[in-house]
Image (cartoon, helix red, strand yellow):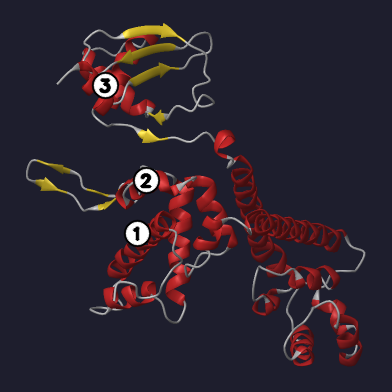
Amino acid sequence: MTDATIAQTEPVLIVIDIAKARHEVLIAIPGKKRRRRLTVLNQLGDAGFEVKLVSSVALARTREALNNSWDKNDPKDAPVILHMMQIGNEQFYQDPMLCGTNDLQELSKTHDIVSRSKTELWHRVLTHYLSLYWPEAERFHRSSRSDWFFAFLERYPSPHFISAMGQEAFIADAWKVVGRKVSKERLLADIYQTAMSSVGLPIAPDSDAARMFRLVLSEGRSLIAQRNEIEDRAVELLKDNIDYQLLTSIPGIGPINALTILAEAGDLRRFQHHRQFLKFCGMELATIQSGTFRGQTKLSKYGNARLRRTLWMAGQVAIMQRTNSFRDKFERYISKDRQNTHLRRKAYTAIAAKMARTVHGIIKHGEPYRPFFEG
């Protein structure tokens, strides 16, 4: 075999240790023992080169093993990175700016921040304000998707504001506040009767306590509006995206879950096998074993945490729906002992892994989800 033949079948490996002042570069050409060193600008991604990522922690451990030393310097790192690339110890990398996923990542991360802030605020309302001023009102809260409950509390922060009116007057006054509801009149009548027997602390309408309660509720309504705006923008941005349409055909994956998957994983077609995608998500199985000791096999979690959480939540939603392969697998998994919490936890993990394989499969093959494809 000639050097030209080797060069055609094996890739040229280029290692760059990026620093602030200069970038140490090491080039390994197949069939040649001598490695070339030079310095280049950090513009390989723009030039169309395939870029891989090497873990800094793995690099440090490999450097210590190869050099039998803990010292750190850039020229010594380049050969170590090259060794890691030659043995396949590398990760996929996509530049968000070059791949066009930067806007998706900002939408996804901002939605996550707003949702967390809204949840934290709701817990504050639940554990402090409602427990003091209207403890019975919690049972009327159904969903965090609408802000009618916050709007209602903003208008009536204490049940004594309601009990001061007659029932008919209250129903007429609150009719537009609660929005579109089934059996709205019966709901308002139930709220009125609850307010009449409430044990909440009486506060004056112009008191600082009522003012602070309304201030917190106003912040909650603002967060809900921000979340809805982000979701509308995500749908508008991705409605013509083929991968988005394929992802939303899967049970449990809605606009935000699809947005997060596309933002965090990028182009899933670069993963040749679903095991590579599972490893990227940190959902591959790992076991601690030493001598005669063998630990419990569990998820490694050495991957993208937001992507792993999204797939887990999508699996939870899928098994709550009536008919699909995810629910069928979950039911078969727990059929031996439905009350066994450890078995149910393993079933949830299996469903999340199945969700990851399904996501990779439909994107790679370009076909929408088909229920019970295994059958």
Residue that badge 1 annotates = 353
Q: Residues within 10 Å of mark 2 (few under 14, many from 20)?
A: some
Q: Amino acid at mark 3?
A: Ala
Residue 94 against residue 11 in the figure, above or below: below
Q: Residue at x 26, y 21 (%)?
A: 7
Image location of residue 258, percent across then percent down: 54, 57
Residue 99 sits in quarter: top right
Q: Residue at x 40, y 75 (%)?
A: 371
Tag 3, which secondary structure? helix
Residue 52 against residue 316 in the figure, above or below: above
Residue 245 sits in quarter: bottom right
Mark number, residue 105:
none
Disc number lying in front (1 or 2): 2
Q: Is residue 133 left or right of residue 38?
A: right
Distance (Cα) linking label 1 and label 2? 15 Å
Q: Residue at x 47, y 46 (%)?
A: 267
Q: Amino acid at mark 1?
A: Ala
Residue that badge 2 annotates = 271
Residue that badge 3 annotates = 7
The quadrant of the picture occupied by the C terminus is bottom left
Please name whichever residue, 207 or 48, is drawn nearer the observer in this view of the structure: 48
Q: Residues within 10 Å of mark 3 (few under 14, many from 20)?
A: some
Q: Is residue 204 left or right of residue 65?
A: right
Q: Amino acid at mark 2?
A: Phe
